[in-house]
Image: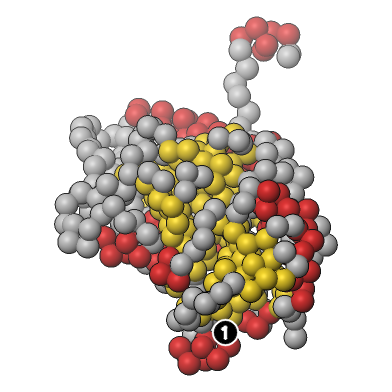
Amino acid sequence: MTYRISILIAVLFSAPIAHSFCGFYVAKAGAKIFNKASQVVIARHDDKTVMTMANDFKGEPKEFAVVIPVPTFINEGQIHIGDKNIIDHLDAYTAPRLVEYFDKNPCQVYRRYHQAKSAPVGAEMLSRAKKSHGVTVEAEYTVGEYDIVILSATESQGLEFWLKENGYRIPNGAARVLGSYIKQKMHFFVAKVNLKEQSKLGFNYLRPISVAYQSSKFMLPIRLGTVNAQGAQELFIYALTQRGRVETTNYRTVKLPTGMDLPVYIKKEFGEFYRALFDQQVQAERMKTVFLEYAWNMNWCDPCAAAPLSVKELRELGVFWISENNRQAKKVFVTRLHLRYTADKFPEDLVFQETADSSNFQGRYVLRYPWTGTDNCSAAREYRRNLKKRQEQEAQRLASLTGWDINKIRDQMGIVKLIEEKNWWQRIWGQ
């Protein structure tokens, strides 16, 4: 059977709860709540990059293949088979989250001081290159359960023909995109599953592939991923750098709405809420924007949606600038970017830069539970009057963020539309 090319955003390529802030974390919205979601981890410092790709391929392993443009020749030692559990950990650590607060009895006189601060918490090199149709097979490796070929090419039609001739099913339109990478003198990293090796290793799923390379180019080629895509795709990028936040230079990087109070029933529907919120933001930006979901120094978090990654896990993801024996503060800043893309909305590959901005940001949504006591002091009466206004504001905010029907939201909350008291002049003339 021929191999299907699942051309990813290929590059050049339950945890403890923190209680230090006012409230506590209750839920997260990770990459798994989205369909067709691919994940790429980029560890980058100076001109050195380690790219780890987690495929969301669904189907028989024998039908899987991936073609990745890379800026330089790749030796066998520069390829590593990773651990999906670590990417899942990083996803949970950086995911948008819900936090809960509980209103106190307004009749009690109290003062509170809070400090929102957490404790830092194989195959041999070919003796000579094989050439066909202007394609040079620079090297062939077997790494883990993958057979890997490193190619160079002089023209796109020849590369397309070579791939088809060697059992890869290329979608229509691939030659044009491949040609743009050939003009940049890029190599091609081609991987497919070696079923015999996979059976021997005992894995029944596809593990992530990491590639280490040195290049001045800080970018992620996504155009190949649009050639045979059925509809829009979700891409999550987790950038690990030394100093500060990563952003795209050829597309706008926009922070998602965050920090607002929402109706408490959203706790049971957080995944649905976050998908709707993201849909609304994508639509508002006409699917031409990269969204920032998280940016934080990895030595601490507030709140922690998952425990910070260990030094061992960070090194597994390619953070080469910290040593295995490092027990002090980790010089690692994580940026989580999320985009939904199609070929017409994202016609260029993503180009990144590391900024000097090390300010913290997270997608964080607040649930405030009302006080339900029976005390009837003046402060309690005032609280109940203001509570109605607050709940109506929460309903309207949720409707604005998601596009959901405001009346259905009110029904879910068990409230009726708040009728504001008219001003004295409105009461005179019946306005």
Residue at the far front in the pictured view = 128
Secondary element at image label 1: loop
Asked if residue 371 can be seen in this view, the reply is: no
Q: Is residue 262 above or below residue 8?
A: above
Q: Is residue 248 above or below residue 267?
A: above
Instruction: From the image, tell me which residue sits under label 1.
Output: 194
Does residue 59 appear left or right of residue 255 in this picture? right
Q: How is the image coloured?
A: secondary structure
Residue drawn 61% across the image and 36% down it: 251
Asked if residue 151 can be seen in this view, the reply is: yes
Does residue 154 appear left or right of residue 17 in this picture? right
Residue type at mark 1 is Asn
Can you give x and y, in whole percent of width and height, for residue 299 in the image?
A: 26, 49
Does residue 28 appear left or right of residue 394 in this picture? left
Q: In the figure, residue 131 lies in which quadrant?
A: bottom right
Residue drawn 62% across the image and 81% down it: 61
Q: Is residue 302 above or below residue 147?
A: above
Q: Nearer the viewer, residue 163 or 262?
A: 163
Q: Nearer the viewer, residue 129 or 196?
A: 129
Residue at the far right in the pictured view = 172
Can you give x and y, in whole percent of width and height, for residue 115 in the image?
A: 22, 38
Quadrant of the image containing the C terminus: top right
Residue drawn 63% across the image and 17% down it: 422
Can you give x and y, in whole percent of width and height, for residue 372 in the image?
A: 40, 46
Q: Nearer the viewer, residue 376 or 74?
A: 74
Can you give x and y, in whole percent of width and height, for residue 255 in the image?
A: 52, 36
Quadrant of the image containing the N terminus: bottom right
Classify mark 1: residues with Cα within 10 Å, few (<14), some (14-19) or many (20+): some
